[in-house]
């Protein structure tokens, strides 16, 4: 052991004498002494000792209150340090109070040296284990930051929650709008957890019939229904020893929710049309883009099922609530695209970044990534290594459409495609027409028609 021990006693001679005696039984430890509150705090910050042996009567004027105050101060500075309190003879209540405030143990004075040495040895082990755990957790959170990207306080809380969830086996419910990264967080919980060596199985029941969902999840026996020509294993068994991620959980049929409750309770699954049961053990992560309370009120989610799957809830904020992360997310999307497609686009100019940061992003991170990737392809096509504002193409959403009939909307869509192609070709109509697979004359007719309609709309 190479840990440090700080002896705090207002009697410096007594402290040095105690250190001399303890070194005989604990030669591998480094001992230090302090006789005042100020010196104790200075050495504590400088040395970060694993163990503090504290005499409560540190100041004559304040008595034991001076020791209690210092105990609280030291633990606030470093909660991994273990504090052993020395109390006066028959002052057990002081020792109990010290334990309540966070001390690991107490001992009456004069201290029995073998007993004190044993307490110090045990406290060093406790401190080192705690510090090793925190170091690993900090490293884990740092690794998770490469998956759950951003430096906003909101996303830091998500990272910490993901790190915590990865070290447990309890069911997790991820809440957030579409495109916020619920699937990414689910994968991170699995990949940084103890079940990482087994499968991560994802299932989304949207638009599926109850029979199909039950067959997908539980499997089926051959001949159990029309079309069941072969036995099916089912996703629950595929996820055995691993993680099952159920996305859009509010779309799961109510009868399936009941069946899943039984599986989660008994850890056994029965295939559709079969009397045989199989043991199964998987970690369940669910996600929803709806408020669970509203889903329960709308009879889309059973209350008992909700309580079973929501032991730990992580709420993922919308991108508009953490716009300070847009730059990092955009550059990360660009970096991944370079690695995947070998595009030579490395930066985003400042004006272009300001455009990205000014938008509300109703599609959240997924929409941002799509816009950045599309712009990167255009910049690469034009031979530029920097992504510019004119590279962006933002899909017009229904809420933003200006109305009109079917024909008008078709014409507007044609025009948007042409404008996008012109941006990608640097305004060259020949290249734009070739990219769209149309004649240049057809392209020009649409542009002229649009120009005419704009002119007539301006005519008083």
Image: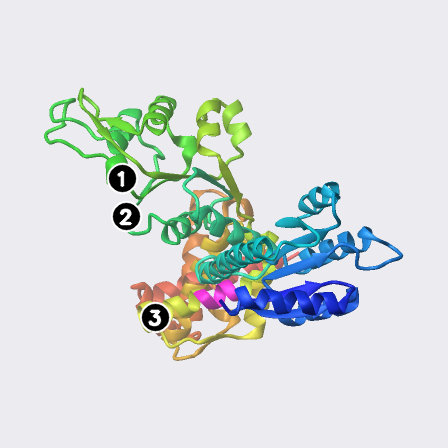
User: What is the CA distance from the residue labelled 1 to the residue labelled 3?
Assistant: 33 Å
- 459 is higher (above) or lower (below) than 166: below
Quick check: 350 above or below 182? below
Residue 346 in the image, given as x and y percentages of width and height: 44, 76
Give the mark nearest the N terminus, 1 or 3: 1
Distance from label 2 to label 3 (Cα)?
Answer: 27 Å
How many numbered markers are drawn? 3
Q: Which mark is residue 240?
A: 1
The label shown at residue 339 is 3
Name the foreground residue: 63 vs 214: 63
Q: Quadrant of residue 100?
A: top right
Q: Earlier in the sequence, mark 2 or mark 1?
A: 2
Is the C terminus in the top left, top right, bottom left or bottom right quadrant? bottom right
The residue depicted at 78 percent of the width and 54 percent of the height is 69
Give, as a single range, the part of the protein colored magenta.
328-332
Q: Secondary structure at mark 2?
A: loop
User: Does residue 299 sit above or below 284 in this rendering?
Assistant: above
Tell whether label 1 touches label 2 (CB within 8 Å): yes
Classed neighbour count for the residue bearing mark 1: other residues with Cα under 10 Å, few (<14), some (14–19), many (≥20): some
Pair 2/3: label in front:
2
Q: Who is closer to the viewer here, 392 or 361?
A: 361
Whether residues under marks 1 and 3 lie with C-beta atoms below 8 angstroms apart, the answer is: no
């Amino acid at each position: 052991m190479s840990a440090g021990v700080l002896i705090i006693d207002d009697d410096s001679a007594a402290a040095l004498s105690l250190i001399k005696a303890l070194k005989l039984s604990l030669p591998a430890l480094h001992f230090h002494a302090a006789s005042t509150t100020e010196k104790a705090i200075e050495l504590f910050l400088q040395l970060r000792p694993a163990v503090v042996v504290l005499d409560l009567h540190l100041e004559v004027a304040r008595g034991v209150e001076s020791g209690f105050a210092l105990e609280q101060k030291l633990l606030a500075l470093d909660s991994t340090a273990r504090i052993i309190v020395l109390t006066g003879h028959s002052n057990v209540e002081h020792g109990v109070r010290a334990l309540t405030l966070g001390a690991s143990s107490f001992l009456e004075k004069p201290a029995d040296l073998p007993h004190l040495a044993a307490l110090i040895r045990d406290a060093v082990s406790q401190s080192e284990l705690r510090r090793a755990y925190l170091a690993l957790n900090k490293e884990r959170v740092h690794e998770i930051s490469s998956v759950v990207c951003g430096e906003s306080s909101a996303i830091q809380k998500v990272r910490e929650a993901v790190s915590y969830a990865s070290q447990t086996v309890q069911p997790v419910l991820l809440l957030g709008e579409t495109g916020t990264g619920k699937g990414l967080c689910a994968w991170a919980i699995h990949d940084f957890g103890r079940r990482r060596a087994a499968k991560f199985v994802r299932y989304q029941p949207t638009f599926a019939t109850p029979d199909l969902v039950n067959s997908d999840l539980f499997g089926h026996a051959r001949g159990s229904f029309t079309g069941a020509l072969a036995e099916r294993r089912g996703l629950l068994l595929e996820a055995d020893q691993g993680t099952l991620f159920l996305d859009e959980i509010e779309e799961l049929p109510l009868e399936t929710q009941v069946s899943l409750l039984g599986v989660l309770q008994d850890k056994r699954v029965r295939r559709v049309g079969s009397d045989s049961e199989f043991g199964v053990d998987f970690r369940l992560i669910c996600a929803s883009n709806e408020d669970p309370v509203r889903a329960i009120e709308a009879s889309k989610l059973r209350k008992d099922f909700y309580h079973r799957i929501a032991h730990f809830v992580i709420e993922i904020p919308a991108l508009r609530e953490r716009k300070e992360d847009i730059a990092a997310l955009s550059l990360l999307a660009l970096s991944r695209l370079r690695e995947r497609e070998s595009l030579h686009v490395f930066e985003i100019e400042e004006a272009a970044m300001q455009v990205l940061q000014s938008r509300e992003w109703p599609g959240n991170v997924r929409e941002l990534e799509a816009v950045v990737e599309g712009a990167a392809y255009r910049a690469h096509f034009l031979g530029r290594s920097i992504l510019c504002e004119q590279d962006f193409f933002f899909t017009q959403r229904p809420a933003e459409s200006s109305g009109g009939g079917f024909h008008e909307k078709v014409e507007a869509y044609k025009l948007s495609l042409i404008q996008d192609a012109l941006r990608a070709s640097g305004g060259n109509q020949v290249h734009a027409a070739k990219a769209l697979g149309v004649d240049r004359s057809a392209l020009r007719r649409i542009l002229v028609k649009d120009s005419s309609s704009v002119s007539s709309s301006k005519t008083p």
